[in-house]
């Protein structure tokens, strides 16, 4: 792949959106992205038009019947397959950069550690959905579960966020485990916005140097 693929992960309320905005502003102001290339910001679930419909099936909590755990897993995989084929792979092939708010790590953390589905099954679906596309770096914005709950107090929970404290704790343990991978960088998201972006910028510079 010619472009760079950067992913942000974390439990709900970890500040991914803020940091993605800060990083994209900074990247555009530098010459790290080649002159004729661009930066594409996307997300899962819902990075494509089809994915928007899948997102609503997954997260809308006003539906009478919610998907069972395996159906939920398959819907996240379907969203990812479409996202990779329609957006991520063609963009990277052009040499453009992609920042995605969530990717495979979220499925391992939420459906694996949260819902307790078989990690091997999740990884097999990941292989099918991604066809070998993997992030160059994944940032885990790490906040304690209590802080996540506090930050979201005035927000309406989606269907997954409604699962409660124990579920979220298991998801958080999942993310901690995944972040031990050398392609992940865990950043404490209780630090100031300014401190966090400095750490992210430094990791991106390292990534370019080591290419
Ligand atoms: P968002 O609110 O960050 O857009 O994420 C949507 C919700 O979907 C969030 O609660 C995490 C959840 N999720 C999963 O459970 N599995 C996945 O694979 C992904 C991508 C998200």
Image: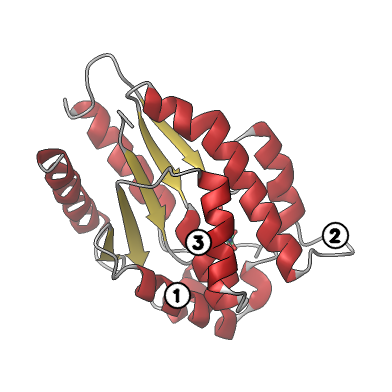
CA gap, disc 3 and disc 2: 23 Å
Which residue is more in the foreground, 65 or 77? Answer: 77
CA gap, disc 1 and disc 3: 9 Å
Q: Is the CB of mark 3 within 8 Å of ligand 1?
A: yes
Mark 1 vs mark 3: which is more N-terminal? 3
Q: Position of residue 206 (x, y in %)?
A: 12, 46
Left or right? Give the position of 174 relative to 78. left
Mark 3 vs mark 2: which is more N-terminal? 2
Q: Secondary structure at mark 2?
A: loop
Q: Is the CB of mark 1 within 8 Å of ligand 1?
A: no
Which residue shows up at 22% across the image and 51% down it? Answer: 200
Q: Position of residue 32 (x, y in %)?
A: 18, 29
User: In the rendered image of this protein, does residue 24 appear above or below residue 180?
Assistant: above
Q: Which residue was labeled with disc 2?
A: 63
Left or right? Give the position of 3 relative to 35. right
Mark 1 vs mark 2: which is more N-terminal? 2
How crowded pointer 3 is (Cα within 10 Å; few <14, some 14-19, many 20+) is rated as many
Which residue shows up at 23% across the image and 26% down it? Answer: 33
Question: Would residue 73 be visible to someone looking at this image?
Answer: yes
Which residue is more in the foreground, 125 or 174? Answer: 125
Which residue is more in the foreground, 193 or 76? Answer: 76
Which residue shows up at 43% across the image and 35% down it? Answer: 41
Q: Which residue was labeled with disc 3?
A: 106
Left or right? Give the position of 112 relative to 92. right
- Quadrant of image for the C terminus: top left
User: In which quarter of the view is residue 67 placed?
Assistant: bottom right
Q: Is the CB of mark 2 within 8 Å of ligand 1?
A: no
How crowded pointer 1 is (Cα within 10 Å; few <14, some 14-19, many 20+) is rated as many
CA gap, disc 1 and disc 2: 28 Å
Q: Which residue was labeled with disc 1?
A: 174
Q: Residue furthest top?
A: 36
């Amino acid at each position: 792949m010619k472009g760079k693929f950067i992913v942000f992960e974390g439990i709900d309320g970890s500040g991914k959106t803020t940091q993605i905005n800060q990083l994209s502003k900074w990247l555009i102001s530098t010459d790290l992205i080649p002159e004729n290339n661009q930066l594409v910001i996307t997300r899962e679930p819902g990075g494509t038009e089809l994915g928007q419909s899948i997102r609503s099936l997954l997260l809308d909590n006003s539906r009478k019947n919610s998907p069972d755990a395996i159906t939920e897993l398959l819907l996240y995989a379907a969203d990812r397959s479409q996202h990779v084929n329609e957006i991520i792979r063609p963009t990277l092939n052009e040499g453009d950069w992609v920042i995605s708010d969530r990717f495979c790590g979220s499925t391992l953390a939420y459906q694996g550690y949260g819902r307790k589905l078989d990690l091997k099954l999740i990884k097999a679906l990941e292989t099918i959905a991604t066809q070998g596309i993997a992030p160059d770096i994944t940032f885990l914005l790490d906040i304690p579960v209590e802080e996540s709950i506090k930050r979201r107090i005035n927000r309406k929970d989606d269907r997954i966020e409604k699962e409660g404290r124990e579920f979220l704790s298991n998801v958080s343990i999942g993310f901690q485990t995944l972040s031990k991978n050398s392609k992940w960088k865990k950043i404490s998201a209780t630090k100031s916005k300014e401190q966090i972006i400095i750490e992210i910028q430094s990791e991106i510079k390292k990534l370019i140097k080591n290419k």
